[in-house]
Amino acid sequence: MNDTSRGMTRSYVTHLECSATGERHDAGRLHGLSRARMPLLVRYDLEAVRSAVSRDALAKRPLDMWRFRELLPVMPGADIASLGEPATPLVRLSNLQGIAGVEVLVKDEGRLPTGTFKARGLAMAITMAKAFGVKRVAVPTSGNAGSAAAAYAARAGIEAFVFTPDDTDDITLREIGYHGAKVYRVNGFINHCAKIVREGAATMGWHDLSTLEEPYRVEGKKTMGLELAEQLGWDVPDAIFYPTGGGTGVVGMWKAFAELEAIGFIGSKRPRMVCVQSTGCAPIVRAAEAGKDRLEAPWENPTTTIHGFRSPGPIGAPLVLQAVHASGGFGVAVDDAAAYAARAEAAAKTGLNLCPEGGALLVACRQAIAQGRIKRGERVVLFNTASGLKYPMPPVTRRLDHAKAVDYEGL
């Protein structure tokens, strides 16, 4: 039996709002995009939330993502499709060159169910889909969103269809199928997978869980920002380095900080939001560095092998760029080979097994420090978005014969 709604006696949601036009949409029914075909954002009665919960009351609750219930869209009496989503730790990096004088913390999202930050968004999206009576969902994914969607759909008793690019890591494909989803390889990129989901909706009757094409994945990802502020004593870091594909996490955290200020939990300080992508697919970085507030065109022919970066034309780009520009942030594009090398270095020298996207963040952080974009004495947070155990690691080739004398000095 799934968890119930954790003591919710009322919902503080007032409406959904089109992120482009501000038009209000009814929160009491299932939505995809707004009438303007743009992402919808959930809005709350923040004055009521301010009166309903305090920092002290929050501190007494279980350390999971559902503790922030007044700022979540879950309805009273609804079943939460939970697999036990814990607060993820902040781990200080040391023993690495290029970061001296800067406090570098890794928020390790790989500790979540299915080993990925996608658990936050999909737990919320599946919970809300079930509340609205959805029986079938579909998601285009580069991998980790598919594994999370499959797991939470299984938890909620919802049928799941997952479409993923042909070169997705086999271990992730097996994980998706193992959770009972119908998973299909597609000979293209994630935008081609999204087209299949979109065009199949009328025939298949599924609810589209594509990034920012429904309003609740961002609310789950928002808990990263809520949780981070609490872990830092109701403060925010000087900068957040975030691996950016669809950008839901950037949008969610930026929203979280505004809501926390409105209820009096933090002040007006904001972290500089730093979007990190691959040189083989960097549409957000290209637009950010050019001072643009939207993408002029999708990235053509992505070549990156880091799957989380292969989003050539994310629909949420204007919202991501708004957060980057408003925060005084910037974008960094990192070479894939450098990201993989940094991942290996971090594992060997710090014990943290980062995902490839996490390795890219370490490279980007070092570059920003060397360029003076990050100053000595500042505190930055890198979001490692998945467990490194989900990705290939070098084989072990050394062997010993127990029947022969061991040359210990030669080991």
Image (spheres, helix red, strand yellow):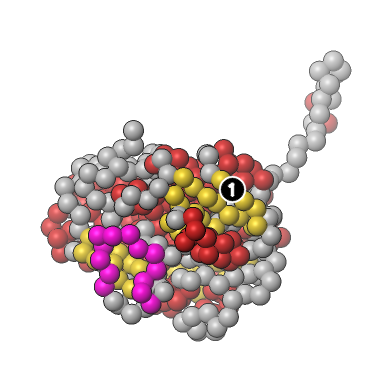
Residue displayed at 52% across by 70% down: 314
- Looking at the picture, tell me which residue is in the foreground, 313 or 25: 25
Q: Quarter-wise, where is residue 25 in the image?
A: bottom left
Quadrant in the picture for the N terminus = top left
Q: Is residue 366 above or below residue 224?
A: below
Residue 113 appears in the figure? no
Considering every residue shown, the one lying at the far front of the view is 203
Quadrant in the picture for the C terminus = top right
Tell me where residue 7 appears, x and y as whole percent. 20, 42
Q: What span is colored magenta in the figure?
A: 24-36
Tell me where residue 244 appears, x and y as whole percent. 53, 65
Q: Is residue 296 above or below residue 395?
A: below
- For the stretch drawn in magenta, the main secondary structure is loop
For residue 35: magenta?
yes
Residue displayed at 63% across by 63% down: 189
**In this rendering, would 314 be left or right of 236?**
right
Residue 85 appears in the figure? yes
Tell me where residue 163 appears, x and y as whole percent. 58, 54
Tell me where residue 319 appears, x and y as whole percent. 42, 73
Considering every residue shown, the one lying at the far top of the view is 403
- Looking at the picture, tell me which residue is in the foreground, 237 or 353: 353
For residue 327: magenta?
no
Q: Quarter-wise, where is residue 223 in the image?
A: bottom left
**In this rendering, would 173 be left or right of 198?**
right
Residue displayed at 58% across by 80% down: 297
Q: Quick one: SS at disc 1?
A: strand
Question: Callout 1: few (<14), some (14-19), or many (20+) C-alpha neighbours within 10 Å?
Answer: many
Give the residue type at disc 1. Val
Q: Which residue is mark 1?
A: 183
- Looking at the picture, tell me which residue is in the foreground, 122 or 380: 122
Residue displayed at 51% across by 64% down: 198
Q: How many numbered marks have been drawn onto this rendered protein structure?
A: 1
